[in-house]
Image (spheres, helix red, strand yellow):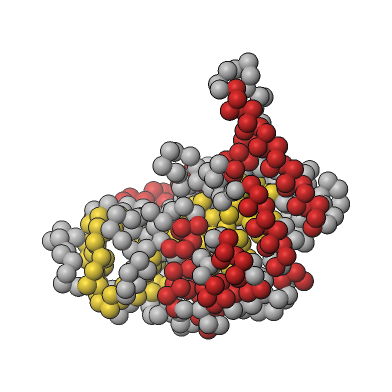
Amino acid sequence: MGKAMRSAGRRLVAWSAICLAAGTWAGRADAEIRAFVGAEILPIAGEPIPEGTLLVRDGTIEAVGPVGEVAVPAKAEVHDVAGKVLMPGLVDTHSHVGGGWAADDSAPIQPAVRNLDSIDARDPGFQRARAGGLTVLNVMPGSGHLLSGQTTYLKLREAGTIDDLLIHTADGRIAGGMKMANGTNPRGEPPFPGTRGKAAALVREQLVKAQEYRAKVGAAAGDPEEVPERDLAMEALVEVLEGERVVHHHTHRHDDILTVLRLREEFGFRLVLQHVSEAWKVADEIAAAGVPSSIIVIDSPGGKLEAIDISMENGRALEEAGAFVGFHTDDWITDSRLFLRSAALAVRAGMSREGALHGLTLAGATMLDLAERTGSLEPGKDADFIVLSGDPLSVYTQVLETWVEGEKVFDRARPEDRLAAEGGWGAGTVRREPIACFDEEMGR
């Protein structure tokens, strides 16, 4: 080991000791109880609180209410957030942060593939997302297939490996959905479909096979001599048929949207429509089907031909029709740091303020089956929230802090976090040791 490396190693050990002594290791809590006092609180599940207190114990919300009505324990770590706005962490139902590519070019339908196995948990995009106030992501494979694989739901904790980010269901399974697509993207040369009709036929064919596989497993009643040979693809599609895995379906044109609704009616799978660029043309049909839509709001022209009729009024049209509406980034299509802007543009186009804020938070949590844990500020839920400098729909507002399960994962006052928020030299560099201290000499 060279002299320079030994010196760097000694400095790292020294900084580690200082950080541990000061209690500033990332992820360590200085107190079991934290009180955030004086901010305007937007609980989402209730009316705004002009001057409120949020009490957090062991990563869980214990109480939320007006100042003076929420008792703050003497031993609580008190955060003065007067003049700020505090709201739930943002939930992105469709992101590509961290990579997470799944299916390859061998077939148009590949349900056995998990994007979990290709997500880079150290990707700097995760810190960009935290800088934008995001606390939950549905990381999806791409849309170049009719079915490109299993998606992964993530909590944006500080992480060294993907396991640190995973969300688990009540029965211990890794939480995630299934990515499907139609329209232009999955069309191509055989074995990919050349037409929209063929695309729907291929999907229908595989879902029928999954029904047959499920029937054979059921009929075998556990008899090893009768149980069919294990098929990972069919197992994943049976999870779709059983409603255990939600289908997140990329779709743009109104006719493609209706095709998805027909398939859902035929096979009974749970569905979230993603993008729905022409939702305004079929808002009543979407509402009548009782299917939620996660829309993307683009603030600049361009893109693919099938999305040429996308409208910022999609949120208003769906809301007025009585449909359930949320938002997503499709990051990089919309930078995660600008997610709040999506709701602001939807409001500018006629959507209600309440509906837009709900769409950024509790709507997304509901679409990911996480509404009992996150998406609103209510006692018993995870302490996932953000501190803003002002109104969440103002272009001048900045995300000051992001908290996940009661731990601060973004602080604009920290130089390395400010870099992630603003960009610049080194912003795209993978983060190294999870040290909350910032060592200028070592370049971190």
Residue 40 screen position, x and y as percent: 30, 76
Q: Nearer the viewer, residue 288 or 414?
A: 288
Q: Is residue 65 left or right of residue 160?
A: left
Relative to the observer, which residue lies in front, 224 or 54?
Answer: 224
Q: From this view, report whether residue 1 is shown above or below residue 315.
A: above
Q: Position of residue 337 (x, y in %)?
A: 52, 70
- Residue 142 appears in the figure: no
Indicate left or right for 196 with 427 as reference: right
- Which residue is drawn at the image coordinates 67% and 55% (left, top)? 262
Q: Which residue is drawn at 58% across and 28% down?
A: 218
Which one is in front, 61 or 234?
234
Q: Position of residue 409 (x, y in %)?
A: 40, 60
Residue 48 horizontal/vertical position (percent): 32, 75
Relative depth, front residue between 323 and 49? 323
Q: Which residue is drawn at 53% across and 67% down?
A: 323
- Looking at the image, residue 437 sits to the left or right of residue 105; the answer is left
Above or below for 370 versus 83: above
User: How many marks are shown on the rendered structure?
Assistant: 0
- Res 265 seen here: yes
Q: Which residue lies furthest to the left in this view?
A: 74
